[in-house]
Amino acid sequence: MVLQIWLDRELFLEKLPHRVIFDEIQYTPELLTYLKMLIDDSRDVKGRFILTGSQQFQMMKNISETLAGRAGLLSLLPLSYEEIKDRVSSKKKGGSLEIFVHSCLTGSYPELFTHSGYDSRAWYDSYVQTYLERDIKSIYNVGNLRDFHRFMRLLASRCSQQLNLSNLANDLGVAVNTVKKWVSLLEASCIIYLLSPYYKNIGKRITKSPKIYFTDCGLLCHLLNIRRRPDLLNSPLIGPLFENYCIQETIKYFDNMGLTAELYYIRTKTGKEIDLILDTQNGFVPIEIKFTKSPTRKMAESIEYFHKEIKKLSLAKGFLVSLIDTSLPLTENMTACNIHSYLGKLKKLV
């Protein structure tokens, strides 16, 4: 079949059924010109060809150059809470905690989820190596791959924190512009997500640097060398890891719904912060995230501060996402809930 494509691409395409899926299309970019002609011959037919590829940069370059205006683009993130919760919870009791632990120690990539016998450490080793050597080195000149790998690990250690390019550059011994370029590469390949601060019409007391999150806690924990349940639960990074998990699931929810996520965080220069703000039809909904099964009123202090002190923000009632079993009102403006309940509430907010 490969030989036939090479010898006569037009004849090969003519023999195909009406609807076709081309996997790893980046390896045969020469087909795109012929697909363009077929699409132009029947522009009223939608979804005739589905093109998939794991080498995102090269694939996007070829499609944007050849099929501009003829293709809808979708990025598939790792599996979401909704996609894995039934299978994980049926095997282990513990609800949200067990699903969080599974997402950290096994990961959310489909291959790891569907093949439970896989060694996730070996899989992620291969994934990182493949990503570095195939996607990054072959397409972009990132310089020293060892430095880039160190950069990924350093970025992982700062998950859920504000992005400071100068500090990263100093720790790595590279230029700030190099770090900025590397951050852009990871963001463009959907490995990290930069959560923007909200500061419009609020004043100079609000910080304006984005926060860093990974879209897969499995990769994040792999880069942090967290392999076992005790290592995870006793890690000094357990709070930031749980925050990363809740943010990644929020991103996936909006992405899977085909919605543009209006997500922000807010932090004053004196340290008052709301982890996440959702810009919804009901206004700005504040979200706090805490790795605890016993949320307290004290954990609502930041949200209460912004309700009282920064009126221009016009906050709606919000939530504290935790490991609590049953939702519980903490204050007039805040209810504690678990990740399952929180994701269910998103459906009513958007």
Image (cartoon, rainbow, N blue to C red):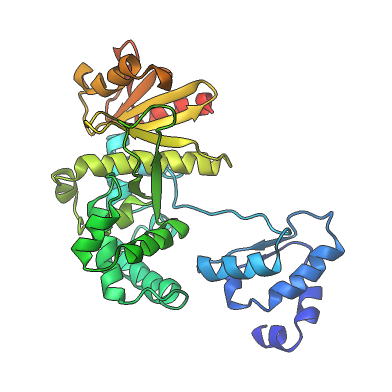
Up the image or down, 9 lies above or below 86; here it is: below
Location of residue 263 in the rendering, given as x and y in whole percent from the top left corner: 44, 36
Mark yes or no: residue 90 visible. no
The image quadrant of residue 299 is top left
Q: Which of the pair 174/12 is nearer the observer?
A: 174
Q: Residue furthest top?
A: 332
Describe residue 14's horizontal placement relative to residue 207 as left or right.
right
* Residue 320 coordinates in the image, percent (x, y): 31, 25
Is the residue 228 above or below the residue 49 in the image? above
Q: Residue at (36%, 35%) from the top-left corner?
A: 265
Residue at 55 percent of width and 24 percent of height: 281
Quadrant of the drawing holding the N terminus: bottom right
Q: Position of residue 335 (x, y in %)?
A: 33, 18
Looking at the image, residue 4 sits to the left or right of residue 135; the answer is: right
* Residue at image coords 29%, 67%: 175
- Give whichever of 87, 148 is nearer the camera: 148
- Location of residue 318 (image quadrant): top left
Q: In this rendered view, identify the residue nearer to me: 21 or 152.
A: 152
Image quadrant holding the C terminus, namely top right
Against 207, is 106 above or below?
A: below
For the view shown, which residue lies furthest in the right direction? Answer: 41
The x and y percentages for residue 53 are 55, 66
| Along the viewing direction, whichever of 83 and 69 lies nearer the viewer | 69
Marker count (numbered): 0
**What residue is at 52 percent from the left and 44 percent from the top?**
255
Q: Is residue 28 above or below residue 109?
A: below
Residue 113 seen anywhere in this rendered image of the structure: yes
